[in-house]
Amino acid sequence: MSDETRETPAGGTAPSRRALLGWGGAGLALGAAAAGVAVAAARSGDDDPATAADSGAAVPFHGAHQAGIATAVQDRLHFAAFDVTTKDRAELVALLKEWTRAAERMTAGHAVGDGAYGGLPEAPPDDTGEALGLKPSRLTLTIGFGPSLFAKNRFGLEGRRPEALVDLPKFPGDNLDKARSGGDLCVQACADDPQVAVHAIRNLARIGMGRAAIRWSQLGFGKTSSTTPDAQTPRNMLGFKDGTRNISGTDTAALGKHVWAGEGDGPGWMTGGSYLVARRIRMHIETWDRTSLQEQEDVFGRDKGEGAPVGRSKERDEPFLKAMLPTAHVRLAHPDSNGGATILRRGYSFTDGTDGLGRLDAGLFFLAYQRDTRKAFVPLQRRLAAHDALNEYIQHVGSAHFAVPPGVRDKDDWWGRALFS
Amino acid sequence: MRAVRFSVVTAAATAAALTAVTGCAEKSDGKGDGAVQVVAKDDSCEVSKKELPAGHIELAVQNKGSKVTEVYVLFPDDRIVAERENIGPGTKATITAEIKAGSYEIACKPGMKGHGIRQKIEVSGGKAAKRSPEMDTAVAAYRTYVQAQADETLPKVKVFTDAVAAGDIEAAKKAYANSRIGWERTEPVAESFGDIDPKVDVRADGLEDGQKWTGWHRLEKALWQDKKLGAEEKALAPVLYKDLTDWQKRVGTADITPTSMANGAKELLDEVATGKVTGEEERYSHTDLVDFKANVEGAEQSYNLLKPIASKNDAALTTTLDKRFAELNKLLEQYREDPSSYDFTSYEKVGKADRKELSDAVNALAEPLSKLAAAVTK
């Protein structure tokens, strides 16, 4: 457990509200507080390794930052991008309030509204019911606002679009499907039980009907990066450990430096928020599988078994970048090759059956959070798109960018209040 | 159109709504000794219990005869409460329904023909449905609407079936979509007659084993896909007319309640959401938007009749519904040049993004519309 306190967006060191609220929900022992280490126990909140191990627990919804970013990565994902279909700002605001209340209930393991049964027999129940009897499963729901929401003559938000919420440039090799790209809103649902994540998106979609319609969605499994460095680093669909150097969810200094938008970074409503890039990256699985082990390891710059960087013996040994091929993925992606640019990855593997040609429709659903996309994902991806040896085996087929506002503070607060108020 | 087996569900749902109005709907799993055993043979129809409590009933049917059979639960006037067709020799089937107090008949029809072998049953308990005068007004007005739709449809069907019988492909194509509008506007009521729907509105993929394909879509395929009218098609045309005449005669006897009207409106949107918006319903003629419009019109009719009741109980809901109906209608208007005609854009010319927009608008209306029944009965 970290002995640092969580940084506030302003740079202070008070424990966040979510962290304080967190320990009860996270099921930590009361004895810790009684022993006078309340702050230490409290600040750990959902980031505590012990909590991460308890896959059934509830992650506190309220806090300075939205849960689902620094939170220890859960096993499953259902990510949905929505088009706002209403033209009425008041309807959009009402939707965001209703979504917030539903999200509070679902992340705590409760059914939406009046529940899934016991109501009027001639009317459909408020909740769809497939998560009844399941644990909260560390469900987090994280909302983001896409560039199109800030378009002129829509909701009067054109003056509030953060400069960092850029239209992503076209990167060489991109083969983007419009039907899998963009969106006015997104909701990232992460949980340890896939049914809990699917239930959450399904209920939010239902509440949204008439105001917001799902544009595309993606299911993910097998987290491909970890925000808990003590845990085993997971492998991606190419069989390699991925995310060894990721930012730890407990490293408040790194989070403050690279992930959370601070005061003065952009519009005030984004302080404590973050910028999310979502990319659907298809992998050419079959050709990869018939690539020699040597080439596979050269492509990544790590060995396949241990995950150690070239010339080193342990996974977490400091990589010696110059020992790798100039086109090695790890070398090109490393902050040292990118002027320190660092992102927090929360990607998941996906397999959507086969593609009609018998090829596995599989890959990485890449999710990256950062303080300023212009200084992180964009230069990083430019470099990768131009030089990465891995490009022979992958293709970016979907893309979206969202401004992820700060957390919902309490029961009276709602997703996006600072943007719309 | 739905497959035959769905008609049982429709009937049960309608009856469930009835019992719900009386407040006597009982939660029951319908298992165990609650089930009524029905043993169907070629010359008998044995029913284990003839006196039943109102509420959920379950018939456990065994066909011990040599012929395929069907079993019906009927109102005294032969309206169908619930039914199950195509129960093969030596097989079992289950029929469930919600039933209020009254006299009923259970009919087994060996060979699936004729009047059937019948047993009377008595259902007791519960209270008579209590309806306000404004509910009665709404139901009566809707009943008139349903009958008028059928009456106005028959001559249009005649134009279509005569053209088919005469082998006039162009005239038949022209009359096809128009002949379906009245049916599509009142589809949930039409479907409550479980035996008519599969004869007139079944699609190839909805057929059960051994079922002969008849009706509109059989002729639609001949006209647009096969592009010829043979002896078989010409012979099917008068059969369609006859089956729809049967519908016209019986439609006035349909069991209609405020909640079945409300849920019927929602079901019309469900028809759009599952069959029309995908282009499945009119896959050869691509006249899906005509059906689409008719379904919405029928739903709107139900809704408008119930609105005085619903707006008292849930004004926010009726405000939303007014808005959503207007939005969906406005969207649909983009697909026809003349608002007084039913010449809509061919659905094959409606692109993917536009279909998505239509689908979103249908969901936007259907989701709040699903709350109408509750608002009516509050």
Image (tube, helix red, strand yellow):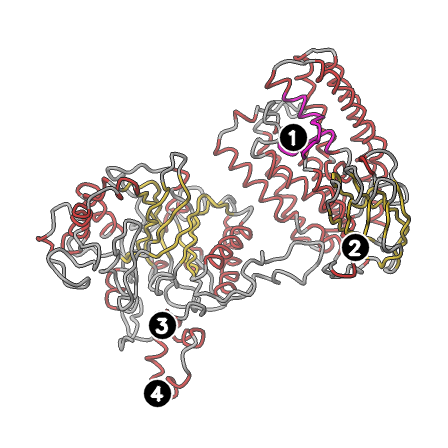
Residue A42 sits inside the magenta stretch? no
Do callouts 4 and 2 point to residues on the same chain? no
Query: What chain is tagged by disc 3?
Result: A
Do callouts 3 and 2 point to residues on the same chain? no
**Magenta-colored span:** B198-221
Determine the CA span between mark 4 and mark 2. 63 Å
Determine the CA span between mark 3 and mark 1. 60 Å
Query: What chain is tagged by disc 2?
Result: B
Query: What chain is tagged by disc 4?
Result: A
> Three-letter amino acid code at disc 4?
Gly
Residue wearing tag 3: A16
Q: Quadrant of residue B126?
A: bottom right
Residue wearing tag 4: A36
Do callouts 4 and 1 point to residues on the same chain? no
**Mark 3 Cα within 10 Å, few/some/many (few <14, many 20+)?**
many
**Mark 2 Cα within 10 Å, few/some/many (few <14, many 20+)?**
many
Give yes or no for contact between labels 4 and 1 (Cβ–Cβ under 8 Å).
no
Q: Position of residue A185 (x, y in %)?
A: 43, 49
> Three-letter amino acid code at disc 3?
Ser
Q: Position of residue A256 (x, y in %)?
A: 26, 65
Asked whether residue B340 is in view, the answer is yes
Secondary structure under tag 4 reads helix
Determine the CA span between mark 3 and mark 2. 57 Å
Image quarter of the C terminus of chain B: bottom right
Q: Which label lies toward us, 4 or 2? A: 2
Residue under the point 74% across and 34% down: B197
Residue under the point 14% across and 59% down: A319
